[in-house]
Amino acid sequence: MPVEKREMIERLQKNILQWEGYRPPPVGIRNLVGLGMVEAAFPNGVFPVGAIHELVCSSSEQAAASGGLVTGILSVLMQQGGVCVWIGRAKQLFAPALAVFGVEPHRVIFISLNKDKDALWVMEEALKCPGLKAVVCELREMDFKQSRRLQLAVEQSRVTGFVLRNAADKLGSTSCAARWQVRSLPSAPPDGLPGIGYMRWQVDLLKVRNGQTGSWVLEWQQGRFIPIEEIAVTEERQVG
Amino acid sequence: MAKRYMAIVFRHLLTDALALRRPELKEAQFVLAAPVKNRVIITAASPAAEQQGAFTGMAVADARAAVAELVVVDDVPGKAAKLLRLLGLGCIRYTPIVAVDMPDCLLLDISGCTHLWGGESGYLKEIVLKLRKAGFDARAAIADTIGAAWAVAHYARTNPIVKPGEQSKAISGLPPAALRLNDEILERLKKLGFRSIGPLLAMPPQALRRRFGSDLLLRLGQALGTIEEHPELLTVPVPYVERLPCLEPIRNAPGIAIAIEKLLAALCIRLQAEGKGARKAILKCFRIDGRTVQTGITTNRGSHSVSHLLKLFELQIAKIEPALGIELFVLEVPRVEEMEAPQEQLWAFDKGLADNTLAELLDRVAGKIGPQVIKRYLPAEHYWPERSVKVAASITEEPTTAWPAQLRPMRLLNPPELIEVMALVPDNPPKFFVHKNKRHNIDKADGPERIGREWWRDSGEHRDYYVVEDTEGQRYWVFRSGYYDGGDAQWYLHGYFA
C-alpha cells in the first residue's frame, strides 16, 4: 500500500509539473543549456525553457555579469539558427561582446526603450512570438501581476524569457521559474601566469520553483560553461 | 461602361468664401480687388454688388461711381486655387476622381457612383444642396463629356442633366463661350455672327479649322465626345482601396475596429488573389463635420493577413478622433509588394530572421512605439570601438565581415567616463582607479591594446586599452588617452566585462 501511494504521489507530482509548464526532459538529453550541474537544481533536472527567469542585478558590474551568463545560455538555445530579441536601455549593450559568448550579434534584434511600461509590453508581445528562441529584457522592477502575464505568454509559445532586474532593493515575489544572481569572481590564470584568466562568476539560484536553490562557481572556457567545484567552497566563504 | 461627368461651377467662389469668414459682409456690396498696371481692378464681386453694377474686370474707381456703399477688400492671390482644392477634396466622398478646373470649376467623374444616391438627379441635388447650405453659390451639370457638362453648368438656365448621347442637342443653344475657347477666337466668332454653337456644329470641320484653327475643333470634339479629355486629377486614385459608408455615424473605438476589420477582410481577399502583400496602408475617416482624419501603418514585409494588419491598426485607433461621428471609412494601400505563395510546411523548421511572426512582432512594436527603437547591428570595418558596429539597413541584411575576435565588454559606456588612476610605472596598467567616488584596487590586468585614431576621420589621441580586474573580481575596460607624458594623461572607464 505505501508503495502504491508513493507511486501515485510521484505521478501526481509529475502531472502538476506538466500543468505548470515543465515538460519532461527529452530522452537522453542532459545538460540542455550547458550549465552542467546547475541544471540539476531544476525540476526533472532540466533547465526550464519556455519559462521566465529573472536575474537580479544591483550594479552595472552585476548587470554585465548577468548579461554574460544569459548570453552563454543563449548561445546554446540559438545553436540551430534561431533569433532572439534583447530589450534594453538605449546604447548600453555592446553588440560585439555577444560574439565572445558564441552568439552571432546580427541574429539579435535590439529594442531600446527607456520606460518599463513599454519594455513590458514589448516583452509580452515578443514572448508570444513562436519564431523567437529567447527574449531578454532589462527592467527596473517587476511586480507579481506583470510576471504572471509574461509567464502566461510563454506557456503558449515556449519562448524562454530572461528578465534582468536593476532595482535589486525591491524584490517582491514573482511567478518566475527561477531567480538568479550572478556576481563576478576573481579569475584564476592557469599556472600563476600574469594577466586575467577565464571569466569566472558565482551563480546563485535564490529561488527555484519546484527545485533546489544553490550556489555554484562557473567559468566560461572556450565557448562553454565549466563548473569549478573545489574553489566554490572557499569562494562562498569569502563572499560570506 | 459609359462615362458620366459632372461639372460644378462656383459663380461667386471668392466672395462667398469671404462672406463665410466675415459674416458682417454677407449682405454688403463688396468686391475683391487687386492692383493691375497702376489701376485697382475688381477680381470678384459679391452678388449684391453685381446687382448694383459692379462687375469683375471693372476699375474700382468706376465701380465706386456706380455703387455708393462699395466695400473693397484686398484680393489674396492663389486663394481660388486653394479653395477649389479644399472643395474638391470634400467631393471625394462622392467620387474618387475629382479634378480642379481653374478658375471656378470642379470636374467629377461620376461613372457608377450615382446609384448610391438614388440616381443622377438625387446625386446632383445632394451635392448642390450641400454646397449651397455651406454658403457657396454652386451650380452643377451632368453630361457624357466634360466639355458638355462644363458648358451646361456655366451657361444653361434649365435642365442640368444631359441625357446620354444628347450633348449636341444640349449645347447647340449655348453661346460659343461655353466651349472654353480663348478670347481671340470668341472675338472672331462674334464678328462673324455666331451667337450660338448650333451653326458651328453644322459646318464642315475643314472650314472651321481653316478659319479658327484646330483649337475650336478640339473643344467641339471634347464637348461632343469624339475626343477624349484627361484632366489633371486632384488625388491620384490608389489601385487598392476599399470604402465603407456607415448608416449611422461611428463614434467609438469598437465601432472603428469593426469597420477596419470589414475593410481589411475585403481588401485582403483581393490582395491574396493577386499574390500581393500590403507594405503601407492608410485609413481615412470622413467625419460628419466635414473633416477627414487619417492614420497609417507600415509593415516590414508585405502582408495580406487580416489579423496582423488589424493588430497594427488597433494600435492606431486611439489616435483617431471621431468627434461627432465618422460616416465613411476609406482604406487605401498605396504600396504593395509581390508575395511568394507560402509553401505548405511539413516540418516547422526555423526560419530565423525570415520568420513571419518576427516581422509581425516588429511591425507592432514600430506601430506602437516607433521604428527607431528597433535596431540590428552588423560589424563595421573599424577598430575604434564606437564605430565597430553599424546599424543594419534591413531585417535580413547579412554581415559582410566577421565579428571581431578580441574580447569586448558587455556594456559600453558612451561616452567614456573620466577616472582617477594611479599607476606604479608609466605605461603600466593602473594600480587602482576611482570611479564615482569608489576606489577599485586592481589585482590583475591585461594589455595594453592600442587602438589608433582614424586620422582621416577625426583628430585626437590614440587609446591604450587595458582589461583590469579588481580585488572583488569585477572586470573593467579602461584606457589611457594618448602617451604617458609627464603624468597628465587622461584615463577613462569605457566598459564593464561580464
Image (cartoon, coloured by chain):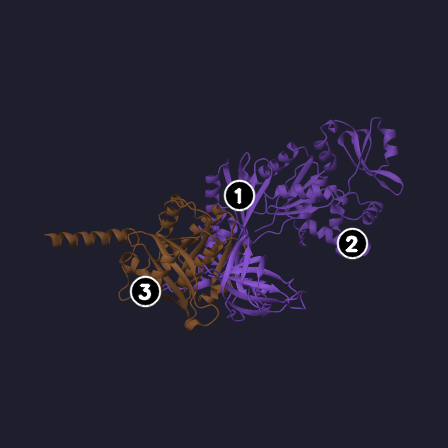
- Please, which residue is most extreme toward the left here? A1
Q: Tell me, what hue is chain A?
A: brown
SS class, disc 2: helix
Q: Tell me, what hue is chain B?
A: purple
**B303 left or right of A11?**
right
Q: CA distance from mark 1 to mark 2?
A: 50 Å
| For residue A221, above or below residue B173 | below
Q: Residue at x 67, y 32 (%)?
A: B135
Q: Which is nearer the eye, B240 or B221?
A: B240
Q: Dot 3: few (<14), some (14–19), or many (≥20) neighbours within 10 Å? A: some
Question: Is there one chain holding both mark 1 and mark 2?
Answer: yes
Mark 2–mark 3 contact, CB under 8 Å? no
Q: Dot 2: few (<14), some (14–19), or many (≥20) neighbours within 10 Å? A: some
Mark 3 lies on residue: A31
> Dot 2 falls on which chain?
B
Question: Is there one chain holding both mark 2 and mark 3?
Answer: no
Q: Say which of marks 2 and 3 sits in front.
A: 3
Kind of residue indicated by mark 3: Asn
Mark 1–mark 2 contact, CB under 8 Å? no
Give the label on residue B412, or none: none
Mark 1 lies on residue: B329
